[in-house]
Image: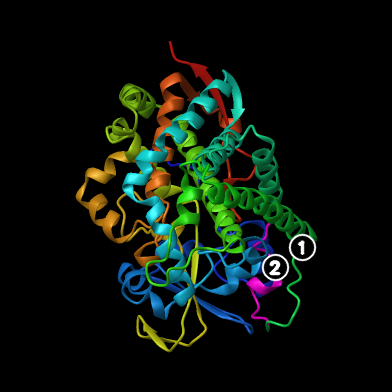
Amino acid sequence: MMRHPVKPTHRADRIGLFAYLRAFRRDILSAQPARLYHAWMAEFRTPFFRSVLINQPDLIKTVLKDRPQDFPKSDSIGEGLRPLLGDSVFLTNGALWERQRRIIDPAFEGGRLREVYPHMQAAADAMMARLTAGRHEVEEIASYAAADIIFRTLFSMPIEETAAQDVFHEFRRYQRAQPLVNLGAFIPLPKWMPRFHKRDTRDAAQRIRALIKVMTQARAHEIETGHVPNDLLTKIMTTVDPETGDRFSRDEMVDQVAIFFLAGHETSASALAWALYLVAAFPEWQDKIATEAEALDDGFSGVSRLRVTRAVFRETLRLYPPVPMMVRETVQCERFRDRDIAPKTSVVISPWHVHRQDRLWDNPDGFDPNRWDSENGKACARDAFIPFSAGPRVCPGAGFAMIEGVMLLAHILRKFRVTLHDADTPVPVAHLTVRAKRGIFLQFDPRE
């Protein structure tokens, strides 16, 4: 019998609005019907809003690549995240977003990744120094390591420093407050109307922004005095928009740093934790990764030789994409699959369902890192693999995340074997990102 990695349950095909909202609060993924793994498109209508989910590659290409200006980001996500992220590049649209990307993108170019790699390596070394034999909750390990990488590459500051610790723990409280679950995410509200954010969500967001503001102001002072670390924060704060000649203000930098930390550490931690679960569930891949991990001794150039590790990590991103759904919005009448789509309709693109679409992928629910060398895998990689989105709004840190995840996974498996006990089988759930309901517990045993 073919083994498949764990997958959430699904709801009944027909369900009332309030039952759906209750299910959504518990878990975004299990609140969806099973038919979404086969359908090219599905509609959901309520008295308050209408949404369509699209799984068809040519429709996804239209929305993300061909006409992104006609499908801006929906504010249904922004309603929950704006208290923390403000006008960050993750939430903005139009000319403001274009200006932000012109300033941010140069920091993540290939040459810059080589420059910041020593910071990644230092965080990996610190992680391995902390890691001991025994039973561990790997989401905790992954979150700490990913946050350390963000602080070292962004602020030239290891996470052991007090300021980094404070931000890390505040972000954990913020995520557990489920910021996406709020009235404005489901019902369009006028701008003057209160948003009814939960107090825990609002308070955590204010504390995080206050901490980030202190650190960005300190860096601004360092830039003025000429004593500046060579890291991502310095690069972004000193980059000039080639069209306007402007730089980010200090307040704008608080918004951008907040999304760099949230996206950079939360998504990377999710992917690394699920990768460790997968190699524990399919242990035949561990020795292959450990063998090629010797290339890590060659630094940045060695990462390119971690081909098996990269295939395993890509397969992890397929099965457990950290951001399970993306929401855009129509600005005019559209025609999708012979159906009229009205303006202000939410267009949901679900990497979770696209990556498991049974009309597209061979063995869609199976774990098969070799698929990326097959004709089906190559075709799907072009048309149906979107863990970092696609088109102009592709995540600027996608290359950064791939190097980080592959490097950390290879480091761990070079030193340890990981084992999953049946009683510890995780249950995937999604709020901000795809996580395990009660954590992912693995046994770590040193290699001989």
Q: Is residue 391 above or below residue 262?
A: below
Residue range (magenta): 178-189
Name the residue located 26 percent from the left edge and 50 percent from the top edge: 377
Q: Is residue 143 above or below residue 350?
A: above
Left or right, 270 with respect to 79, comes to left
Q: Is residue 304 above or below residue 327?
A: above
C-alpha gap between disc 2 and disc 1? 8 Å
Name the residue located 22 percent from the left edge and 43 percent from the top edge: 373
Q: Specify which label sits upstream in the sequence, 2 or 1.
A: 2
Task: Give x and y (percent) for residue 252.
Answer: 58, 63
Q: Which residue is mark 1?
A: 198
Task: Give x and y (percent) for residue 206.
Answer: 73, 58
Q: Are marks 2 and 1 in contact (CB under 8 Å)?
A: yes
Residue 3 seen by the camera: no
Per the rendering, the mark at residue 75 is none
- Of residues 412 and 337, the one nearer the viewer is 412
* Image quadrant in which you'd find residue 127: top right
Task: Give x and y (percent) for residue 248.
Answer: 52, 63
What residue type is disc 1 on?
Lys
Q: Is residue 266 magenta?
A: no
Q: Which residue is mark 2?
A: 182
Q: Which color scheme does this rendered protein use? A: rainbow
What residue type is disc 2 on?
Asn
